[in-house]
Structures are given as structure tokens and as C-alpha cells.
Image (cartoon, rainbow, N blue to C red):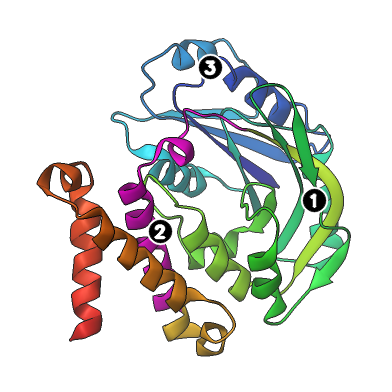
């Protein structure tokens, strides 16, 4: 069985399309977990009108962010494989079935499809990575070089989510999860199918983040990845520019000259990063 985990926050205009696209999947062995994160618009009301026996809806008591909501949905799911879907995106009807068939045929821990990016003006751009099987260090190095580094267009075996639980931060939460999962996977299978539709939104955190916020969360992401490979695969540290990118983030943070007002909204993340920096110096 496959579990589709959908996170929803203030997506009243799009959540119905996201959920309905999951319900329409040609694969029948399917469950859909929707995690509603205390929206301030009518997202909850829209969800209350969508009825399908495959859907299990979880309503958060407080707003915990996309990362913690995804982890909550993954922990509540039962499928052998898991696909993540954002509440403002949608998937083509045969996407999950194509991914799952490939996973079973090749016994692959991760199967990746293509992605279509839809801009706010209606224009779009699609990327596919062909059909191939990737093993060894190329599982990571090739992903790192991909034109679009993305997690949601991938079917991922449950054991990898158990080995690397989803990051609970509110921003840049995918990368510190998918990179270790790629390393631990037995193989990565790619299918030539553009089945994930990603809606580009100027109001998303990715586009609204300040220079300081982006550098802070990116530094934390890189800290996680570096720490993982120091423990599990030091050979990868020579293959990726992790240390260089990390140094650039720290330089960027210094140039922002953060004061108390700038740090206050991200106090927990600031303490986490400074603690880790001190730990590396000791």
C-alpha cells in the first residue's frame, strides 16, 4: 500500500484539487492522510465537504508548521511507501501507480518522477530525468546536480522515514531529510513521467524569506547533513560542497548583523545553530 501525506495551511483555493487528485489515483491500494495545520482561512471547511473512505484527516490543535505536520502525517500512515503532497499542488491520475509499479519491479527504496512548475501567470516548465537506476555515491551526487532538487515527486519506502524522521523545522525542511535517505536507499529508480504539479506562489515561505532567515535555516540544514555524513559516510563529504556552502551561510549571517529584533522570531533556531557552532569549536 502507498500512503499520500498532504499538508494543508491556508490553501482554501487549492486543497480540494490536491485531495481529489490523490483520490483519483489509478492505484487502488492507497490511503490519504491530510494534516490540517490550524488554517486562518476556510481550508478546514473545504476539507469537511470532501468525503472518501481512503481519507483520514488530522486537525492540529496549534499551528506547528509544514515540517512537523508532515512528520505527524507520516507517523500516522501505514503504507509501505509514502508520497508527500503539498496542499496547493496536485498529481496526475497515474502518477502514484507508475511510481509504485517501478518500485516493486526493481525493489527500489526510492522512485522519482518528473515535476511541472506552474507559475502564477499560468505559464509552466516541466523537468523529467528519464528512466534509469542509480546506485552508489551517484544516488547523492546526481541528485545534488539536478535542475530541481525536490522531495515530493518521490515515492519513499517507510524504512527510510523511520531511519531519518522528517525534519520539524518550518523552512528548508526537505533537504536534511532526502539527502540522508538517498544515501541509505538501496537504489534510486527514475521514471519518465511528469506527474507532480508544483504551484509557484509568491506568498510561500521560500519566496518571502529574508536574507537572514534563508541563511539561518540553510546553515541548520547543512549542519544536519554534515553531521549525518560524519557519522555514516565520510566519503560523501569529499563529493559535495557542504563545508563551502556552510561557510557561505555563516558569512551571510554575519553580514546581516542580526540584532535582538531580527533574531526573536527565530530564537529557537538561533540557539540551535549557535550551540552546534560552539560544539564544533570545542
Residue where numbered disc 1 is placed: 99
Residue 157 in percent (x, y) is at 65, 60
User: Few, some or many C-alpha atoms within 10 Å of disc 3 (few <14, some 14-19, many ≥20)?
Assistant: some
Residue 218 is marked as 2
Main SS, magenta residues: helix
Magenta-span inclusion, residue 217: yes
Is 4 left, or right, of 26 in this rendering?
A: left
Which region of the structure is painted magenta? Answer: 200-228
- Cα separation, mark 3 vs mark 2, equals 33 Å
Name the N-terminal-most of marks 3 and 2: 3
Give the residue displayed 55% in from the left and 87% down from the top.
238
Residue where numbered disc 3 is placed: 47
Closest to the camera, between mark 3 and mark 2, is 2
- Label 2, secondary structure: give it: helix
Q: Is residue 91 above or below residue 191?
A: above
Q: Is residue 140 above or below residue 176?
A: below
Amino acid at each position: 500500500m502507498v500512503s499520500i501525506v498532504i499538508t494543508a495551511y491556508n490553501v482554501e483555493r487549492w486543497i480540494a484539487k490536491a485531495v481529489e487528485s490523490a483520490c483519483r489515483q489509478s492505484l487502488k491500494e492507497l490511503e490519504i492522510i491530510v494534516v490540517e495545520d490550524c488554517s486562518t482561512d476556510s481550508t478546514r471547511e473545504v476539507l469537511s465537504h470532501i468525503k472518501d473512505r481512503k481519507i483520514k484527516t488530522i486537525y492540529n490543535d496549534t499551528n506547528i508548521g509544514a515540517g512537523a505536520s508532515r512528520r505527524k502525517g507520516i507517523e500516522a500512515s501505514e503504507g509501505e511507501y509514502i508520497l508527500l503532497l503539498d496542499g496547493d499542488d496536485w498529481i496526475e491520475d497515474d502518477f502514484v501507480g507508475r511510481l509504485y509499479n517501478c518500485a516493486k519491479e526493481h525493489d527500489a527504496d526510492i522512485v522519482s518522477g518528473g515535476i511541472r512548475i506552474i507559475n502564477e501567470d499560468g505559464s509552466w516548465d516541466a523537468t523529467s530525468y528519464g528512466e534509469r537506476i542509480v546506485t552508489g555515491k551517484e544516488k547523492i551526487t546526481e541528485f545534488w546536480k539536478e535542475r530541481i532538487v525536490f522531495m515530493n515527486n518521490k515515492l519513499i519506502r517507510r524504512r527510510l522515514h523511520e531511519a531519518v524522521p522528517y525534519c520539524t523545522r518550518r523552512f528548508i525542511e526537505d533537504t536534511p531529510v532526502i539527502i540522508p535517505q538517498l544515501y541509505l536507499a538501496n537504489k534510486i529508480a527514475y521514471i519518465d513521467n511528469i506527474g507532480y504539479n508544483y504551484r509557484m506562489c509568491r506568498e510561500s515561505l521560500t519566496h518571502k524569506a529574508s536574507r537572514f532567515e534563508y541563511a539561518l535555516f540553510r546553515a541548520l540544514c547543512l549542519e544536519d547533513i554534515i553531521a549525518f555524513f560524519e557519522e555514516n559516510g565520510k566519503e560523501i563529504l569529499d563529493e559535495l560542497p557542504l563545508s563551502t556552502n556552510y561557510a557561505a551561510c555563516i558569512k551571510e549571517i554575519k553580514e546581516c548583523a542580526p540584532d535582538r529584533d531580527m533574531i526573536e522570531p527565530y530564537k529557537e533556531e538561533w540557539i540551535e545553530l549557535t550551540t552546534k557552532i560552539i560544539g564544533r569549536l570545542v
